[in-house]
Each structure stands twice: as C-alpha cells, then as structure tokens.
Amino acid sequence: MADSKNKRILIIEDEFLIGELYARALEKEGYQAELIIDGAEALKKAQTNEYDIILLDLMLPNLDGVEILKTLRNPELTPGFKAKVIITTNIEERKEIKKAIEKEADGYVIKADITPSELVSLVNSVNQ
Amino acid sequence: MEELKRITVKSWLKIFSIISLLDIALIWLLYYSLKHTKFNSLYIFYSFSFIFILLNLVYIRSVVKKLIQPLKFLWQTIAHLNQNSTVEKPDFNKLKTAKDLTINLADQIIQLFTIQQDKTKEQDQKSNGLNNNTVIKNIPVPFLILDNNENVLFANEALGKYIGMQTADIVNKNFYMIMDMSFPSEDTFDVWLKDSKQNTATSIKSWERVRLAVRDNHPVRLFDLAAYYNKDNPQNQTTLIILFDHTKQYMQDDQAISFVALGVHELRTPLTLLRGYVEALKEDLNNEQIDNQQVQSFLTKMDASAKQMTSFVNNILNVARIDNDQLELNLQSEDWPKIISDSVEAMRLRAKIRGIEITLDVAPDLPKVGVDRISIYEVISNLIDNAIKYSGQAKTINVKTYLNSEGLVETCVQDYGVGINENIMSNLFTKYYRDHNNRAQIGGTGLGLYLSKAIISAHDGNIWVTSKIGKGSNFYFTLVPFDKLNKEIKNTSSEEIVTTAHGWIKNHSLYRR
C-alpha cells in the first residue's frame, strides 16, 4: 500500500468539474490535492517544487501542457524538479507529440477511459 | 580562334605601317634639305638620323604603352575566367612582351572557348539531349533525373512550376537543396537511395503523402513520389523521380483527421464527467452516505454534461445537413426574449464552472421573430460557448438583444477575453477553421461558427463580429420579425410537409429549406 499521507498533488486541469472530481477522490485516499486551471499559473506553482505528483492536462488556457512539461524537465529552467508527472488528457495527440511526452512523463492516461478511483490507483502506483 | 591571331597581327602591321609612313616622310624631308641647303650635308644627315631614331623610339614606346594597359586588364579578366589555364603568365614590366602578351591573350581566349564548348557538349551528353527535347520538357507530370551524386541532370517545366522555381535554377544543383521533403514515416527517399546504391544495381519504390517544405509564399504541396534507380543507366542518369500531386485530397484528409481528433476531445470531456459522477454516486450509495444536496448537484452536472454531448452531436448532424443541402427549418412565430433567456439559463452552469457570470439585457417590446427554435438554440449556445472558451481571465459575458435601426431584432454576445486577430476575422466562419495561436490551449472543432452562419443565413439574418486583441469580441446576429418574414414567404411557399426530429408535421406557418 502506497503511503499517501502528506503527499501533495497538483491537479492542472482546465475542465474544473473534472479537476473537482479528481481532487475529491484523491483527498478521500489521504492525498492533499490542489486544483489549478490556468496553464501559466500552473507552471509557476509546479516550479515551487512543493508537490510530489503533478497531474497535467494538455489543453490548457495561456500555456499548454506540452510546454509546461518541457519547462519542468529542463534543469536550467526548473532546477531541482523531482515530482512525478502524469499526463491526463482527452486529446488524441499526434504520434510525434506522444513520443516526446513518453520521454518526459511518468504516466499518460486518457481521462474518458478511467474513473476517478482508477486514477487514484494509478497515482498510488506512481507514488511507490 | 586563328582569326583572333590574324587580327592581332593585322593591328601590329597597321602600327608599323603608320611608323613606316612617318619615316618615309622624314627621309623625303632629309633628301629635300640635302638638295637645297648651303650647309655641310654630312652634318644635316647626322642631325636628321638622330631625330629620325628618337622620333621612332618615342612613338613606338607610347603606342606600346597605350596598347599594353587595356590588354593587361583584358588578360587579367580572361585569366580569372580561365582559372585552370595552362598558359604561362607574362611579365608585364617588360615592354617588349607586348607582342607576347597579345599572343598569350589569344591563347587564353582560345583555351577558354574550348573548355566552354567541351562543357556544353558534356552537359548535352549527360542529359542525353533531354534539355533540347521539347516533348520531354513539356510532359505535364513533374519529374527530374539525378546523377550518381544526387545532382539534378534534368528537370522538366512541370516540376519547375510545381515547386515554384525556374528549371535553369534547378539543373546542376543538389537535389536535397532543391527539394526539402518530409515523409510520413522514417522510410524516406534518401534512406532508400543510399540503400539502393550500396546493395542493388536497380531498384524502384514509391511513397505516399510526401510534403514539400513551404518556401517563401509558395503554396503547400502534398504528393506521392515514385523513384527508379539504376546504377548502369547511360550518361550517369542513375535516378528518375516522378511526383504525383494530391495536395487537394490530402489537405481535405488532414482536416478530416484533425476534425475527428478534435471531435473525440469534445465527446470525451462530458463522458469523463458522466463516468466520474456515476462512480461517485455509486460509492455514496454503497456507503449509505446520502447527502441529498450533493446528489442533486451531481445530477445537475450530469445533465449539463449530457446536454453538452447532445449539442455536439446536433452540431455534427447539422453540418452534414448543410453540406448536403438538407437543412430544414421550421420557422414559427416565437417570443424572442423567452428563447434567449432560456438559452442563456442553460449555459449559465457551464459559465459558472469557469467563474464567469452571464448578464442578459433584453429591450422591451420586441416584435415576435420567425425562428426555428432548435436551430437558433444551437446558434446561441455556440456563441456563448465560444465566449466562455475565449474569455481568458475575464469573468463577465454580456448578452444583449434589441431592435436595430433597420427594424431587425439584433442580438450581441460580448466577451472581454483574448480577442481575435484582424487578419483571421474573415476565416472565422469557414468550416473547420480554428485560430492557430489557440489550438493547443482551447478545445473545439471549428464547426460552431460555420454552423451558426449557415443557420442565421437560412433565417434571412446576418452574423458578424467585431473584436480587439486583448479586449474581447462582440458577435452579432440579426433575426427578421415574424410579420416581415410572413409577408415574404407567403408569396413563395405553398403548404408543405416539414420533417422534424420526432416525425413529421403539416406545415401551417412557415417552412424553409
């Protein structure tokens, strides 16, 4: 059983209701979840290195998920970044983008294919 | 070239004949002086001889000097052109080499011309006279021939036109410099050619969906490519490449693919929510933690998600109808303030989720309008949905409706969001069009405005937009009051059957197609 106590999760999700459902399910499991909609603000938050796991949507206002991921994984732009990043999206991405994401992310999931509790299991497995 | 030598000799003869004439004149003067003078004739003879020699020398020197200067420049120019020259460089400081210089120059020129002739011959042999064959040059399918070093030996006129270059600028250039192509997979032309050169004597292959890198303002080119390699082909013509244009078809395919991808996103979002709420409700029921208020809120959101899916499905269906000229409207006399406030109400939850308030301002005493209730709802929800999506940080959307100066009922959906760039305004109502700058950040299929315009046009109304980057956008549309519409249509339509989603009705009011 993964230890979820005091683990902080940042949910970057532009569909507020989806983010709300995910936060609810994760909090039930004992995680501390924080929800943010705007891409540019989300990047600033993620760069504080206060989070253990980041759920990252790709289609986001002001700054898209692929850009956020690149910035977080660049040690010059985000020094000391250690959080696990799981991509949560409903976009059918092109092959090239999928490949790029594969290199940088710790997980990739289509939101419509999973329920919130299945997302929690996924987060648990990443948090081991 | 012998002619050149002859001319050079001729001009030297001319110079010497002038000098000879001058000398004859002097000799004659000497003879005349000796005959008529009273002085010592030997003395006079010496003086004349001295003047004679001096004059000749001065004259020759000045003539040679004048001649040598332009010849020197000419020699340098020719020598520059003929860099591989085997002719020895003359010593310009020695005047006596003026003649040598002229001969040297003639040799240089002869050599240069011979090399040029050889080159042309070689070129003709290489391309096997293709460059002079008008039939081959004018074959309407773009093609080119490469030598063993991937240099272009021949390109026909159609190829030049297709890639937007003059054929003269293509020939002798490296093929990869001329055509920067991208292939749909890693199986590319250059990989095949390399492999063919190493492993086979002859090989043939084709590729689909090749894209030419866009250069300057030249339009996008998408084509199939066929290539034939034979290392033993005569005149080093090792590779033949033919292009089959499919730009139009492949562009349409691309749009359709991206439409499917975007459509999938539009359906997956409400689907995610429905699955999420179903699971949450199930869990609550299992744990017997029934909070009526929460259940109510979940159900409302589920309803909103289901409606979102319905309107997306209707959008697609209506676009298909418009494209096949099958859009049918059942125009009824409707109370516009009621329709608009119902529509706004239905969108409020979607806006609220993003923290956006919608205000509604309805002018009093609006006349009844002739609208198809279901279709016009699609228009309002598309416009408000756009306003929500493109609101950025703004938190207000205003919907206003009033009677305009032309007596039409005008409605405006106003947001204070990201705004629209002026140069893309004219594309907004085009099918599948989406603003490039926002594609990765805002979902949508590029159908909403296309559909809205078609529906409003079928209502005899107008739709347009005003916008400022960073300040927001105003979308306007007009509807014709029922009385006016009634007069127009009574003259043209008879009683017709109107099909609806639920079956059919006999039309007693208005029917349009």
Image (spheres, rainbow, N blue to C red):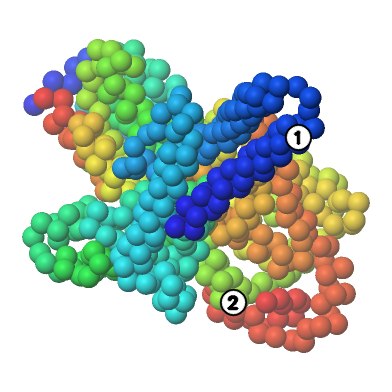
Residue B59 marker: none
Q: Which amino acid is tagged 2?
A: Gln
Question: Of helix, strand and loop, which one carries label 1?
Answer: helix
Residue at the image position 31 percent from the left and 68 percent from the top: B125
The first of marks 2 and 1 along the sequence is 1
Residue closest to the eye, B204 or B30: B30
- Nearer the camera: disc 2 or disc 1: 1
Left or right: residue B236 compared with residue B303: left
Q: Position of residue A23 (x, y in %)?
A: 32, 29
Dot 1 corresponds to which residue?
B35
Q: Position of residue B129 (x, y in %)?
A: 37, 72
Q: Position of residue A29 (x, y in %)?
A: 21, 27
Q: Is residue B166 visible?
A: yes
Quadrant position of residue B68: top right
Quadrant position of residue B384: top right
Q: Is residue B195 above or below residue B99?
A: below
Residue B326 marker: 2
Q: Is residue B394 visible?
A: no
